[in-house]
Image (tube, grey):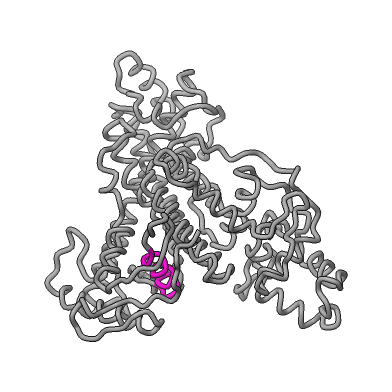
Amino acid sequence: MINSEKNHKEYTVRKALRVQAKTIAKDRVLINFLPLMKFNGYRPPKPSVDCLKEIWDIVFQHENDFEGFADHQSLVKKWIQNDYVDMLYKNSPNKVPKFASLLPLSLNAYKASEKNNINDYQASEQIWHLLVKADEARINDGKPAVIDKLRRFLAYNYNEQLDTVINSDDLELSTWLVASITNHIPNDRDEKGSQVDTSDPLVSIDQALLLADDVERILAYEHYMSRSSILEALSQIFMLHLGLFVLRVAKLLPEMINRKKMELAYEEDSKPVFQIDLQQGFSGPLAKLSGRNVLLHEQQLSMLVESLYYIRKKIDFMVEEGLLDRNNYTLEQVITFDEKDPSIKQKVDDYFTEKLSELSDYVPVNEDEIEEPFEEYIELLNKSYNQFILDFYKRLLSSAFSKNTETGILQQAARYKKYSLGSKLLDTLIHLAMLKRGKNGNYETKVLRLDQFMEWMRDRYGFYINQLIPGFDNDEAYQALRRNERYFSNKLQEIGYYQALSDAYNTQWLIARYEVKGEE
């Protein structure tokens, strides 16, 4: 292999974490997820409509479907582009906006997209992998597959043979518009690409099961909420769980390496926790504790990078020695491989002594004091490149947690960060929380007290609102917690979910916006 700094810096291990350390956008995650659902895990063919001009040709040349649109072309273009098109650099003052795709409001929306502008850096494949593994576990437990339920929802009025949405007049305006445009794009059912490999076990199956349960819960509102509202909620859920999964892997992978085993008996302990501060600003005691919480998660991401280096370089050695097929191996093979076994130790030392010598072309290496070449090689890689890679993982987490938006949990101003809870995400979580299994096994609305809702979010997602997260004891924060709870109840009241007859918990109730009856 040619010696290059790029080869030394390479750290990715797709079998541990598929999503790349990049900034991701929720609409691009969903637009890439749609064809995975349509083709059952196969990647889509190249879109045949990849620019706005082709969309305008469809809209203005098919008067039967878009009656009167051609008479008001300038107005229609502005309306569609502003409300139904995802543009790259849409809000950037220094860059020219580029067409990305139609918004993911219908199963075939991906057919009108520019492939180079909708890169989600394997986030949709990560979500697909999580749902596939969750379904395998659910089916083993006698539960229905969530992917099937989600596909039925996304394929509403979809004719598979024609590859079109029929009876589109039944749809709300936004879904009708996107479906009507894509109905005029050629059938691509027989042109699917390569299949996404989901054979590898997940580092955290618990997170996958929680994602699947959240998807099933939001689909219970199919006949009560608009399709665009459910798709928006799905996008929020996908992004949240991507961030939670990354943090789970960051916690579990170093432990797996230390113990040299994939199976851990305490995966529940790996669930990340979040000190949620709903008050304004970053100077209060709770905001400062939440900021420390963010810092701890970023430190875990640094350990994740170190673990990925450890695994990746071990893979490179095992492949070089013929101990592993790079295209056909399991993560467990690598983690359980003992590089200090006397039968292989000399080869390990020779290989990584050479790697250290090569690395010395790019970073200082004291080759006279090398005792454990493998460990010192990994240590030097982390010393030289960890911070650079960590910055990208911070961007991944910031985008997964929808920083500074009403759909996320992360806020930042200058160098200050904290966890909070956006109103739109809160709205979605309330819908999920206010469901229970009925006698027929389907979800139906239940009554929920304020304290029960806070406990539900704490147990399910690790969101601490009226309590301090474990290990964060602070006398000043206890008063701030009471204020935080008041802010929380006020926020619920503002969005129409809360009523209180007194300060007692048993008189503080959440009000369901929809009455889900759990019908077949």
Quick one: 275 or 383, which is closer to the camera?
A: 275
Give the image quarter of residue 436.
Answer: bottom left
Quick one: 467 or 428, which is closer to the camera?
A: 428
Quick one: 451 or 277, which is closer to the camera?
A: 451
Of helix, strand and loop, which mostly describes the magenta segment?
helix
Observer able to see residue 520: yes
Quick one: 27 or 283, which is closer to the camera?
A: 27
Asked if residue 47 lies left or right of residue 465, the reply is right
Please report the residue visible at 38 percent of the width from the left and 55 percent of the height from the top: 244
Question: Does the magenta segment cover residue 426?
Answer: yes
- Residue 297: percent from the left, percent from the top? 32, 56
- Residue 87: percent from the left, percent from the top? 66, 68
Observer able to see residue 362: no
The span picked out in magenta is 422-435
Q: Is residue 312 above or below residue 390?
A: above
Give the image quarter of residue 167.
Answer: bottom right
Asked if residue 253 lies left or right of residue 223, the reply is left
Q: Is residue 258 above or below residue 162?
A: above
- Residue 360: percent from the left, percent from the top? 43, 35
Considering every residue shown, the one lying at the far left of the view is 475
How many numbered circles does the render carry? Answer: 0
Please report the residue visible at 49 percent of the width from the left and 22 percent of the height from the top: 320
Question: Does the magenta segment cover residue 244?
Answer: no
Q: Is residue 36 above or below residue 236?
A: above
- Residue 369: percent from the left, percent from the top? 29, 29
Considering every residue shown, the one lying at the far top of the view is 343
